[in-house]
Image (spheres, rainbow, N blue to C red):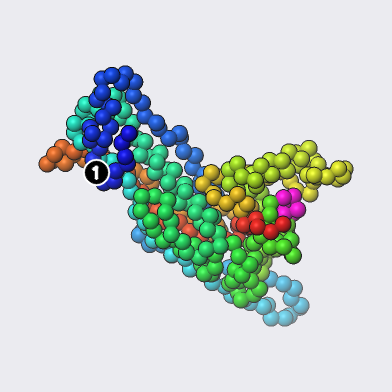
Amino acid sequence: MATTQSNVPLQIADVSDLVDLSITSMFMKFRPDVKEYHKEYYNIEAVSDLTLKDSSMSAVDSYGHTVENAIIKAASPVQGFDKSYTQAWFTGKLRVSKKMWVFGIQKRKLTGVVESMKKMALQTKEQILTNPLNNLATGSYTDTSGSSNFTHDNTGGDGVVMIATTHTNEAGGTDWNNQITDGATVNMDFDYDALKAARKTGEAIRGPIGEVMDQEFNTLICKKESSVHHRAEEILGAIKRNEIPDSADNDGSAIMAFKVLAIPYLTSDTAWFMLSANNVNANYGLQMKQGLPLNLNQMQIDKDNLEMSWVIDEFYQFGFNDARNIIGSDGTNV
């Protein structure tokens, strides 16, 4: 059995079974097709600049009743917060000796090893883009998902973490909260009562000048096959029968059916989020600024030893400015 090596070409000695004629069948253990979960909760934008900075401007709060001959009141919009996105380079590389390619990979028809790099890149990318949720209470963290570590700033334009009770109101009004609470318990564990609390929490979120946003938080995000995921399926079963979960009452459910986005890259068994899916756009929520889509570059041949190599790469940056379209809980309180 060979050991994993870094930054060295694949040689015959590393996978000698490829040239062992007594082995009549050789196959690739490809990763399965990778589902791109991030496309359901990130706003993705193609960009052409190295660094982008976004900001916002509120509506104008000047409309109201005016008595006859009175001066019409005027008001000015409020400027929002800035958030910068500088493109980061994500790369991978496969190096193969000429002898290995001719007598091993080509002969065994295993050239798909090159294409498998893309699946690995997609899976690593999914983990990277999920980590802002895994670090929901952390302003900055070290991401260790890929072959090299990097530091990620996990705060919005107001300098606050994604899920918090102290998000700054742009107009200087009361801070807004997107941490799920029923008014007494914060960070509620997932259950039917917490779903009702989530609706209240989401409805209480106000816009930059205190306006009602009237969002519908209709998508649950949780770890795949977690206790939250299982409980959500149980609750949905009751809701679809128009019943209250864990109740013998004849009343119908106060909660409508919701979508479940169960992500295998989430790490917490208890954390959960509700997303206003119709508000996943450039104004609100998680953003991915894509400078270059995932690209498998043309094969390169080293003129000195004819070693063959392939590089896969892309440019993107991710984060959020305004998290008003997502509410969440670490699920630690009953």
- What residue occupies the far right of the structure in this picture? 250
Q: Residue at x 25, y 37 (%)?
A: 10
Percent from the top left, x then y, of residue 7? Answer: 26, 46
Mark 1, residue position: 8
233 to 211, vertically: above or below: above
Q: As drawn, which residue projects farthest toward the front?
A: 1
Quadrant in the picture for the C terminus: bottom right
Q: Find out whether residue 140 is within the magenta segment.
A: no
In screen coordinates, is 189 left or right of 321?
A: right
Q: Is residue 208 visible?
A: no
- Residue 268 is left or right of residue 144, and the answer is right
Q: Amino acid at mark 1?
A: Val
- Quadrant in which the N terminus appears: top left
116 or 61: nearer the viewer? 116
Element assignment for label 1: loop
**Residue shown at 86%/43% (left/top)?**
248
